Amino acid sequence: MFCMICYDVIITYICFDPSIFVTLNFVISAARTLYFPVRVNLSTRTRIMCLSTMVGTFPLLSVQPTRGLVDEKIQVVVRNLPPALSVTLHSLHCSEDKDLWEAFGHYTSDGQGTVTVAKDASLGGTYEGAEPMGLLWSMQPVPGSRTGLRLRKMDVLTPMVVHISVYSGHMTEGFSKHSPLATVVTERWYMAPGVCRIDIKEHGVRGTLFLPPGPGPFPGVLDMWGGGGGLVEYRSCLLASHGFVSMALEYLSHDKNRTSDIESKTYFEKAFRIVQEHPLVMKDRVALFGLSLGTSVSLNLAAYSKVISMLCVYQWGSRLPSQVHLRCDYEDERVIGMCMKNKPKSVQSEGVRDGYKNQFAEEGCLVWRDIILPIPTDLGEKVDMGKIKCPLMLVVGEDDQNMATVESAKDMTQMMCAAGNEHLLTILQYPDAGHLIEPPYTPHFRASNFIVPQAQHKGTVHTTHTYSIHT
């Protein structure tokens, strides 16, 4: 059951005729689901500036819902336009790093003077065709921005604010220099109302635990990101918004002054137990969720840990690292050494030098996928996939230029077939997808800057590219 409230929208109408300057206030009561944190002032009035050449009519821009989860679809409709009018729908977002991102599509109103983004085709812009969520997933840095940007949310307690506007004519640039016909401000959240965020500093383990609202019990997830390090929360937060107890684990810190028990052979097992032993978690339904470097950790834990028994392992979004199923003795080595030991020395030390098997794409992006090719044939160098006793899902991007994920997935399949446990394996492959597969409607990008944490100095490489799964 949801609590319903009403809010007001003020629409201001201005005539083009200089002899007439009339302001009409239209108060529209609309029922809204109280779906997002109560600290957001839902009574705030949204002012839409509408310009029209037609006396007695004004463009109406509707975006529903104006507040929703990041993976929730929106409905964008423009009404009260003249028939066959060329317009541009434009979205604008200012990131936490103060970079501006935008997307736009070119439309022509129908015979009723309406544009419905869900069914009408964009004739040009950052996306083309009927793309209901094109104003979000096709966002890109505005012209003149820094290169190699990646849009990601670090503070999950605040929303992504997106301004959606409609302009007269088919525009491709200079949006800030023109007045829109109408604008609606929308909020995209990772955290649903009632989700609880808890800092974890137990037994040397650092992370953030997210609890869904309700009495539970819930399935649990230990969420491990990749070699970029730091504590990344948005995926775990979104999982909690959909009914999972999820803990984002930090195991490569950006802060040299922060210490943990990461050198302990039991670090990841301790983290798993924190999730499994939480009173809201179903103890027999706990999964490992690995991204890139986190994939190596989770596969090794699933195969060799004597204390962890999980329901399943998800290797999400083509994030299989260079040594995705190469074996490392996590009980005897630091995980950092484990993760880097199979990379060539030039990549270990700097990551930006043209070292063994490194390649550069035409746009100057570093390609790492050939580092482990050909896949080793010595079974002693790889995780014994026959020891996997729980369901395993691999999500693979077929255009991953960072790592040889397609070849790794094929080799793992052959190993599990030989061991007789291939029934536990599910593989999802996405053509044209790259190394990162993000939550639905996350902006796509071909490459981004990546800071190599092992470097003695701050260097960057370009990692190829993201892809979001649209459901």
Image (spheres, rainbow, N blue to C red):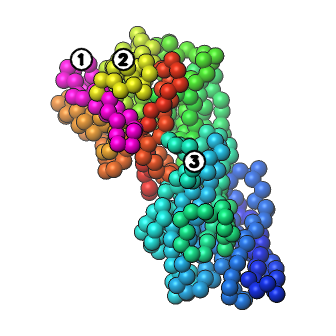
Q: Left or right: 225 with respect to 93?
A: left
Residue at point 79%, 84% (across, down): 18
Residue at point 42%, 46% (across, down): 446
Residue 128 appears in which quarter of the rendering?
bottom left
The residue that mark 2 highlights is: 345
Q: Left or right: 441 with respect to 18?
A: left
Please tell me how crowded label 1 is: few (under 14), some (14-19), or many (20+) other residues with Cα within 10 Å: few
Q: Secondary structure at mark 2?
A: helix
Residue 413 appears in which quarter of the rendering?
top left
Q: Is residue 361 visible?
A: yes
**Is 377 in the magenta?**
yes
Numbered label attached to residue 380? 1
Nearer to me, 38 or 24: 24
Give the CA distance from mark 2 to mark 3: 33 Å
Q: Position of residue 457 (x, y in %)?
A: 52, 20
Nearer the N terminus, badge 2 or badge 3?
3
The residue that mark 3 highlights is: 145
Amino acid bearing label 3: Ser
Nearer the N terminus, badge 1 or badge 2?
2
Q: Is residue 33 visible?
A: no
Callout in the foreground (1, 3): 3
| CB within 8 Å, label 1 to label 2 | no
Amino acid bearing label 1: Gly
| 88, above or below 55, in the image | above
Which quadrant of the figure contains the C terminus? bottom left
Give the CA distance from mark 1 to mark 3: 48 Å
Residue 7 appears in which quarter of the rendering?
bottom right
Nearer the N terminus, badge 1 or badge 3?
3
